[in-house]
Image (tube, rainbow, N blue to C red):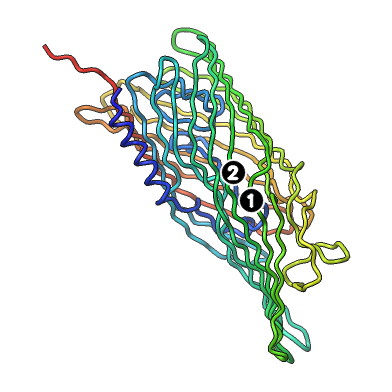
Amino acid sequence: MNMKRIYIAIISLALSVGAMAQSGTNTPYSQFGLGILDDQSQGFNRAMDGLGIGMRAGGQVNVLNPASYSSIDSITMIFDAGFSAQITNFKENGNKKNARNANFEYAVATFRLLPKVGVSLGILPLTSIGYDYSAQSSSKDYITVYNYNGNGGLNEVFLGAGWNLWKNLSLGFNVAYVWGKYERYATSAISKTYSNDLSRVYSGRINSYKLDFGAQWTQNVNKTDNIVVGAIFGVGHKMHGDADLVMRNYQALQSTTFSDTISIDNAYSLPTSFGVGASYNRINKFRVGFDYSLQMWGKLDYPVANDVAGNVSGASNVNNRLRYEMQSGMLSDRHKVTVGGEYIPNAMARSIFKRINYRMGVSYATSYYKVNGNSGPKEISVSAGFGIPITNAWNNRSYVNISAQWLNRSASGLISENQFRINIGLTFNERWFSKWKFE
């Protein structure tokens, strides 16, 4: 085993931690809960809209089910890094606006550590927060301008292993360190006959862990075909993170500022999660599959600012008569269904177009947060793309994975979003541990 090259991969991942920004987003929906959830897929399964629970692909890193790590062979080292660029169109009451983002998304690696045991490590986005919008109202005596903006999110650095316990059964786990922070600002400036600036700053910093388990069963149908059934389980728990609310009230006539800070200890939690998936595979020809996952956010409390009477207060009514407290019913269980597949015309052909992996997937997901007490927007997504093999004198197993994704978030009476994203992933699949013989 070439340990020097393993050290190089680990150092590359460590450098990625410093380079990694939050997974790009610019949506007002990221002001709810912990932000927009990332699907945490890699280059090959992003083109299938995040399909992966029942996928075993020895030439790719599949973080969605750690049991898949055991499929890597003994001479391979895989390093995968991804980038994205997106444009989002927002529509509300006939008004339209566009936003653009570009980001470094993830960096992961995997290799065979022991016979039947594969190991993976890397950095992934978990949630992202990014929005900036304003509104205005007026009356005979005053004009009020409301501004809302926020930024931040959560990332994770993980280490996982997959073990081929029996011929057909593989088990695996990922253990991760989760960290991040956010700031959300809500201000209102009242002016005309008098001036009064009100603001709330919601902030939090989280340092915790994340633990996920996976299993896969592979059943051969014949010499070329097999069926893989997978399951995953995520451990729900309290995260070490405090929520702070700073309230300020500036009154211009008196030139006075009132300020108060409220903190809640251990305010955030990760939900218990489950997932199942299956795929039908023909070696070097095609694979099709489906996933279903459930995240049980609905059982979790969330910090909310309430007035003395107990009614939820909006940012437009900032005052010093508030309680910042944990409240139930602010989040909902999240369900997601994904169907997808890939096709290779002829993996052994000389023509590169016949060796390209063509992929496609669709998914439907419910929201894990509520907006004004009602269910948040549903998500419908379609992805398509391809994996282009990189061929040179010593390597024909690496890929450039390119995909396009369209995502729609919408709900009655809320902002509608249409997002178009381009994903580019570079999968370096090298025979680092092969032994060369000379005569």
* Residue at left offset 50%, top offset 50%: 23
- For the residue pair 327 and 230, the one nearer the viewer reads as 327
Residue 401 horizontal side relative to residue 2, left or right: right
Residue 231 horizontal side relative to residue 311, left or right: left
Asked if residue 353 can be seen in this view, the reply is: no
Q: CA distance from mark 2 to mark 1?
A: 8 Å
Disc 2 element:
strand
Whether pointer 2 and pointer 1 mark residues with C-beta atoms closer than 8 Å, the reply is yes
Disc 1 element:
strand
Looking at the rendering, in which quadrant would you find the N terminus?
top left
Residue 136, relative to residue 214: is it above or below?
A: below
Q: Which mark is residue 241?
A: 1
Q: Position of residue 193 (x, y in %)?
A: 74, 92
Asked if residue 97 can be seen in this view, the reply is: yes
Q: In the rendered image, which quarter is residue 313 located in?
A: bottom right
- For the residue pair 238 and 436, the one nearer the viewer reads as 238
Crowd band around label 1 with a 10 angstrom C-alpha radius: few (<14), some (14–19), many (20+): many
- For the residue pair 296 and 302, the one nearer the viewer reads as 302
Q: Where does label 2 land, which residue? A: 208
Extreme-top residue of the structure: 222
* Residue at left offset 86%, top offset 62%: 310
Residue 298, relative to residue 186: is it above or below?
A: above
Q: Position of residue 188 (x, y in %)?
A: 69, 76
